[in-house]
Image: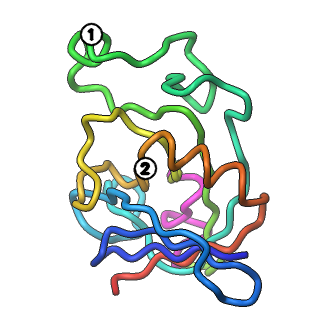
Amino acid sequence: MRIHISIAQQLLTLFDAAGQVLRCYPVSTASRGVGEQRGSYCTPRGKHLIRAKIGAGQAENTVFVARRPSGEIYSPELGAAFPERDWILTRILWLSGCEPQFNRLASVDTMRRYIYIHGSPETVVMGSPGSHGCIRMRNADIIELFDRVPVYTPVEISED
């Protein structure tokens, strides 16, 4: 099993071990484009893997802060009360870079940048860039993906 994320298409594609497409999901990557540097708020490119899966069994719209459930469940009212908050909801697939000095180690380390594939409020537009660096998905989609992929699943993020 492997995942390919296309920045140009704003699409996450899940492949089986034989290379057959299992599912495609619309996503939203960084509004600032691609880049690997810490503090850039860009989506990192290259070869990654899922280092950790966080949120199994949590309710849809569970709010995560620092990778832990905050005790909140996202609602439009909560979103209106905190309009500047970057909502990380439902499930987290924490990515780790595999290419030293490109997306791993030093100031370009994807995992130390806390780059995830995660759920988002239903009002977040998919199919166009808008995140702070992570890959945003619809909540139903991240639950489905989370349940299908194991830890250490390869993830390739490319501009095509």
Residue at 42 percent across and 81 percent down: it is: 158
Per the image, the residue denoted by label 2 is 137
Q: Is 141 placed above or below 122 here?
A: below
122 shown above or below 36: above
Vertically, is 64 above or below 120? above
Q: Is 147 displayed left or right of 136 in the figure?
A: right
The kind of secondary structure element at disc 1 is helix
Occupied quadrant, residue 156: bottom right
Q: Amino acid at mark 1?
A: Glu
Q: Is residue 114 left or right of residue 159?
A: right
Expressed as whole percent of the image width and height from the top left, the position of residue 80 reads 21, 15
Whether residue 35 is visible to the viewer of this picture, yes or no, is: yes
Q: Secondary structure at mark 2?
A: strand
Residue 99, given in percent of the width and then of the height, sits at 62, 81
Left or right of 80, for residue 137:
right
- Residue 157, position as x, y percentages in the image: 47, 76
Query: How busy is the neighbourhood of tag 2: few (under 14 within 10 Å), some, or many (20 plus)?
Result: many
Name the residue that disc number 1 marks. 77
| Residue 65 visible in the snapshot | no
Q: Position of residue 78 (x, y in %)?
A: 32, 12
Residue in the image at 56% along x and 63% along y:
109
Query: Bounds of the magenta span?
Result: 102-113
Q: Is residue 136 left or right of residue 147?
A: left
- Mark 1: give few (<14), some (14-19) or many (20+) Cα within 10 Å: few
Q: Is residue 30 magenta?
A: no
Q: Is residue 59 above or below residue 41?
A: above
Rendered residue at 63%/25% (across/down): 68
Q: Main secondary structure of the magenta part?
A: loop
* Three-letter code for the amino acid on which mark 2 is drawn: Met
Find residue 147 and name its label: none
Q: What is the quadrant of residue 1 in the picture?
A: bottom right
Residue 105 within the magenta-colored segment of the rendering: yes
